[in-house]
Amino acid sequence: MNNRFEEKTVASEVLFEGKVISLRVEEVELPDGKFAKRELVGHPGAVAIIAITDDNKLILVEQYRKALNRSIIEIPAGKIEPGEDNEVTALRELEEETGYGAHQFNYLQSFATSPGFANEIIHIFVAKGLYKIEKPAQGDEDEFINIIECTIEEAEQMVLDESIYDAKTAFAILYAKKLIDN
Amino acid sequence: MNNRFEEKTVASEVLFEGKVISLRVEEVELPDGKFAKRELVGHPGAVAIIAITDDNKLILVEQYRKALNRSIIEIPAGKIEPGEDNEVTALRELEEETGYGAHQFNYLQSFATSPGFANEIIHIFVAKGLYKIEKPAQGDEDEFINIIECTIEEAEQMVLDESIYDAKTAFAILYAKKLIDN
């Protein structure tokens, strides 16, 4: 782990502990000995799945995002439950949100979504060899989802009209395009 | 704007107003008439720049991210100041963080980074025709940055060893590769 320009915590105050996120303010000592405040959000981490059908369609889900006060279209994703293995979470979310299982399921890479203020990490998986599960597990009862299967060209069009408006999904479209073209 | 599955706010409480982010908890009415709580972070938005040199190197910056308690390598980026035009912010951040100006500077697309809990939007720009500015403007005094110029292959290697561990940068690498290959 790289600690270049480390900011050492000299004081930390937890301001909120919620169901999904927490908030704390830390005072840190900078590399030059000066001090600064950091406002930091804690998040349990999440998984997201680039799911591609046998006829090269990308599976997307449309849902309302209160943080943005609008609906957007994203790849299937979900929070990691305490103690749950990332791959188990990803397979569960794929089933709950889309009704699909996958014969091929591989970890791709992980990344922070908002490293300037949050520790949320998303672990990305690629699902191929998709098949419909007869009686899929149900997701969270406060989650309302519309499933969309589209070509890469249709997805690119949805980026232009901002129906797709999400970092992990923008990444997924470029990755899926590369995968399909090869 | 798409409002499918709209969640109507019935109560909202601001818990924190910081220098960078704010936090509020909202009670919302779901499409089925039930109620749920949403923990929401407010953020002013940011810009990020995919900057490619004439010899097809990607400009990256290494900095410590307190939220992750480690240094990571990202494309140049920064928060939007109140009233500042996105493109002005992006050109300013490119100069402050890398010392470069750009003869070609184009808006690419925008996306939310963490739509599950935050309204942060990043506006992505592509900079080409880069030139060194003789006396570049200085950035924030609490920001310590190491500039890296690397090939796409080197950047891909940094994804594998998790030196690059950031959504906008993962997107930028795929986009830059596409741009250079074409």
Image (cartoon, coloured by chain):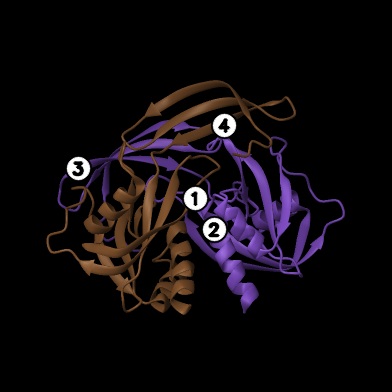
Chain colours: A purple, B brown
Of the residues tagged 4 and 3, which is closer to the observer?
4
Asked if badges 4 and 3 are on one and the same chain, I answer: no
Q: Residue at x 15, y 48 (%)?
A: A33
Q: Is residue B69 left or right of residue B5?
A: left
Which is nearer the eye, B82 or A18? B82
Q: Horizontal and vertical percent for residue B74?
A: 36, 61
Q: Are marks 1 and 3 in contact (CB under 8 Å)?
A: no
Q: Name the residue under label 1.
A: B111
Q: Residue at x 86, y 51 (%)?
A: A135
**Which residue lies most toward the top here?**
B11
Q: Quadrant of residue A90?
A: bottom right
Of the residues tagged 1 and 3, which is closer to the observer?
1
Q: Which residue is drawn at 43% across and 66% down?
A: B162
Of the residues tagged 1 and 4, which is closer to the observer?
1
Q: How far apart are marks 2 and 3 (CA)?
A: 36 Å
Local secondary structure at mark 4: strand
Mark 1 belongs to which subunit?
A: B
Q: Do the residues labelled 2 and 1 touch (CB within 8 Å)?
A: yes
Q: Name the residue under label 4.
A: B38
Q: Horizontal and vertical percent for residue B165?
A: 43, 61
Asked if badges 2 and 3 are on one and the same chain, I answer: yes
Q: Distance between the residues labelled 2 and 4?
A: 25 Å
Q: Horizontal and vertical percent for residue B115?
A: 53, 44
Q: Name the residue under label 2.
A: A170
Local secondary structure at mark 1: strand
